[in-house]
Image (spheres, grey):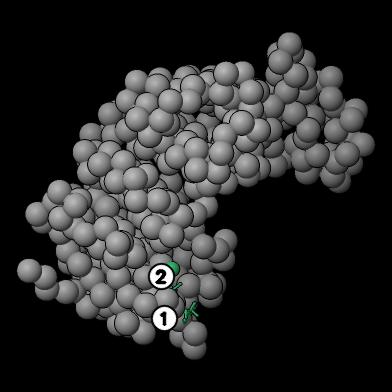
Amino acid sequence: MALSQLSLTDFRNLKSTTLDFDPRLNLINGANGSGKTSLLETIFVLCQGRSFRTHQLKQCIQYGKSGFLLFGRFEGFKAGLAKNSKKLEIRIDGETIKRRSELVKRAPINILNADIFQLIEGAPQKRRAFLDWCLFHVEPSYAEHWRKFQHALKQRNRLLKTRKDFKLLDYWDQYLLDPSLEISSMRREYSEAVENILSKELGKILSGFSLEIGYQQGWPGDQELADALSGHREGDIRRGFTSVGIHRDDIVMTSDGRKVDEVLSRGQSKRLCLAMLLAALKLVNKTRETRIILLIDDLHSELDQEAQNLIYDQLLDMDLQLFISNIDNVSPRSLRVKEFKLFHVEHGTIKPQNFS
Ligand SMILES: Nc1ncnc2c1ncn2[C@@H]1O[C@H](COP(=O)(O)OP(=O)(O)O)[C@@H](O)[C@H]1O
Ligand SMILES: [Mg+2]
């Protein structure tokens, strides 16, 4: 779902303004510290109700102001977001919504910045989040399973921590089981789907190295989850938290049977991370007939020209609305596009640019 217009008020260092965007390609330039990442952040926050830079959304409130406002016109709906130091209010077509997920499912958005390179060496959480982004947008039941799982895990951990009412553990183990198994089987299935897309459609970016992607469940491979939960119960009581389950899942990437972080060069690792993201975008694009918004921040400093060209070739073939910062060494002409919008940011003031 493309974003056609954005109004922003008192967000980070940005001067309050209203901007009209191109449905396919928007380029943002400006000096360091001018506010480019902040502009991308407004779009992310508008679509997600959270930021990619901070867990505390109130950090985005302009210094000295009491709150920020964002308003966006998408193809098909309008979204408004008001954040002050106490609360966040989200509206869709004028109606306040209760769950953030109602907003998030409307307009799929992802961000491509240097964080993507954590996909290989970072904590398993990064890889789970990567896969879950696909699940959330493709599987209608995922959000509800996830909510139930989170609730049950929280209750179970609370019992383990407070060391009271151990009788209730049976109840929460049971409650935990269904959503866990659903999510586990989705993650298994989508690990395979991503592997397929990588080998069939993105071989050029991987430039010759073979890749296998395996889902690794967060409990011993030879056990049922129910047995693992009861088998680890005593240990969990001692530790005070749940040590097995889908919150311990991982995605294991290997090349000819060896872990990728041991065999790939830095350049190959980067390409692999990018290919993973492209595969996720393709997967969601195929299933959901809606345009995905992709923010690309400061990528040019991380990639050589050839890798950039390969990536942009792929991106421009997909159904995406792109917002790209700092693209000064790639001319729009080499991007093969005639229509795009260009914005220049200077000390927080965003100006649409004319070009010839
Ligand atoms: N809450 C805030 N209020 C006002 N200014 C902020 C706030 N948070 C960060 N800034 C400032 O915003 C400026 C722009 O940052 P950023 O968007 O990262 O710039 P760029 O991506 O163009 O390098 C920085 O100088 C930063 O100090
Ligand atoms: Mg920046």
SS under mark 1: loop
Q: Which residue is at a point 47% across and 65% down the rendered structure image?
A: 88
Q: For mark 2, does the 10 Å Cα neighbourhood hold few (<14), some (14 to 19), or many (20 or more) residues?
A: some
Q: Three-letter amino acid code at disc 1?
A: Asn
Q: Is mark 2 within 8 Å of ligand 1?
A: yes
Q: Is residue 232 visible?
A: yes
Label 2, secondary structure: give it: helix
Which label belongs to residue 354?
none
Mark 2: amino acid:
Ser
Give the image quarter of residue 67. bottom left
Location of residue 91 in the rendering, given as x and y in whole percent from the top left corner: 34, 60
Q: Which residue is mark 2?
A: 38
Q: Are marks 2 and 1 in contact (CB under 8 Å)?
A: yes
Instruction: Give x and y (percent) for residue 30.
Output: 32, 75
What residue appears at the point 37 percent right and 44 percent down from the top-left corner? Answer: 307
Q: Regarding ligand 2, which quadrant of the image does it lie in?
A: bottom left
Residue 32, image quadrant: bottom left
Q: Position of residue 313 (x, y in %)?
A: 25, 41
User: Does the rendering let one see residue 138?
Assistant: no
Q: Earlier in the sequence, mark 2 or mark 1?
A: 1
Question: Tag on residue 13?
Answer: 1
Quadrant where the C terminus is found in the figure = bottom left
